[in-house]
Amino acid sequence: MASPCLQICSLLLALAGFTILLVTTMSNRWKVSDAGTVLVTTDWISEGLWMDCAVPAARSLQCKKFLYMLSSDTYVQACRALMIASIVLGFIAAVLSLLGLKCTKIGLSDEDGKMKFAVTGGFLFILGGLCSMVAVSWYAAMITAQFFDPLYAGTKYEIGDALYLGWAGSVLCMLGGILLTCSCKGKKNQDYSFNKYPYSAGHAAPPQDVYIKNSDTVISHKEYV
């Protein structure tokens, strides 16, 4: 039988990853550049999926949204779509997993139904973690390729803090989803092994008729008693 503690720990891991992915999606530090050698009036600049930021010399942080979202590079738009898909999948997975926990009384009371909800939630957590992992890794690969390309004429960036958060959140989401799915799978196999060979220690075997053969006469044990 699945341990409620294992289910709760798995869900907490996945929710922690989901929260980190939310922060990663909204972060403006997907790529960072020390632009002191490029722009004399700027200490550093950074970009995210939705806006870019800069810190002018001796001034506070200034951020502005991209004027035209569709004018961004193709890989940036693809990463936006993947991160949004990851957030949506994670939200649905969180709701289904909460309904499928054995210790909760919300929604279904049938254990088979709860198990299906929990397995579905775990699978969606894994899928959401894969989406975010692809997005973060793709974005990092493009930054690295541009940084080491001697023919690239634009500003060269380095990997920002948000990408490391994205990798960590993706791993936590997938790990939580895998543990949640495996815990329910173990419960199903154990229930099957108990139901396949039912046995109750409180019921004795029914009495059998005993026949005693003496010469040509056959006497039933019940009739004799």
Image (tube, grey):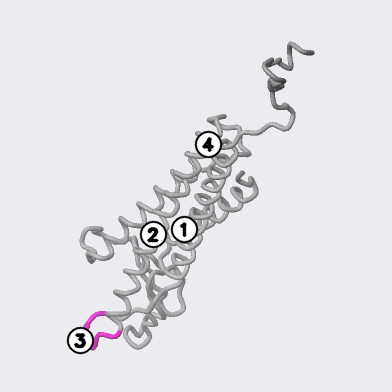
Q: Nearer the viewer, mark 3 or mark 1?
A: 1
Q: Nearer the viewer, mark 2 or mark 4?
A: 4
The residue that mark 1 highlights is 174
**Residue 181 percent location from the top left of the image:** 50, 49
Name the image quarter holding residue 101. top right
The residue that mark 2 highlights is 130
Among the two numbered marks 3 and 4 on one chain, the one whose residue lies closer to the N terminus: 4
Q: Is residue 191 above or below residue 90?
A: above
The reply, left or right, for residue 30 in relation to residue 119 is left
Span colored in magenta? 148-154
Among the two numbered marks 2 and 1 on one chain, the one whose residue lies closer to the N terminus: 2
What residue is rendered at 22% in x and 58% in y? 70
The reply, left or right, for residue 47 in relation to residue 115 is left
Q: Which mark is residue 114?
A: 4
Find the distance from the CA under tag 3 to the CA under tag 1. Answer: 38 Å
Find the distance from the CA under tag 3 to the CA under tag 2. Answer: 32 Å
Find the distance from the CA under tag 1 to the CA under tag 4. Answer: 20 Å
Q: Nearer the viewer, mark 3 or mark 4?
A: 4
Among the two numbered marks 1 and 4 on one chain, the one whose residue lies closer to the N terminus: 4
Amino acid on which the number 3 mark rests in the picture:
Leu
The reply, left or right, for residue 191 in relation to residue 72 is right
Q: What's the magenta bit mostly, secondary-structure-wise?
A: loop
Name the image quarter holding residue 140. bottom left
Q: Are marks 2 and 1 in contact (CB under 8 Å)?
A: yes
The reply, left or right, for residue 180 in relation to residue 221 is left
| Quadrant including the N terminus | top right
Secondary element at tag 2: helix
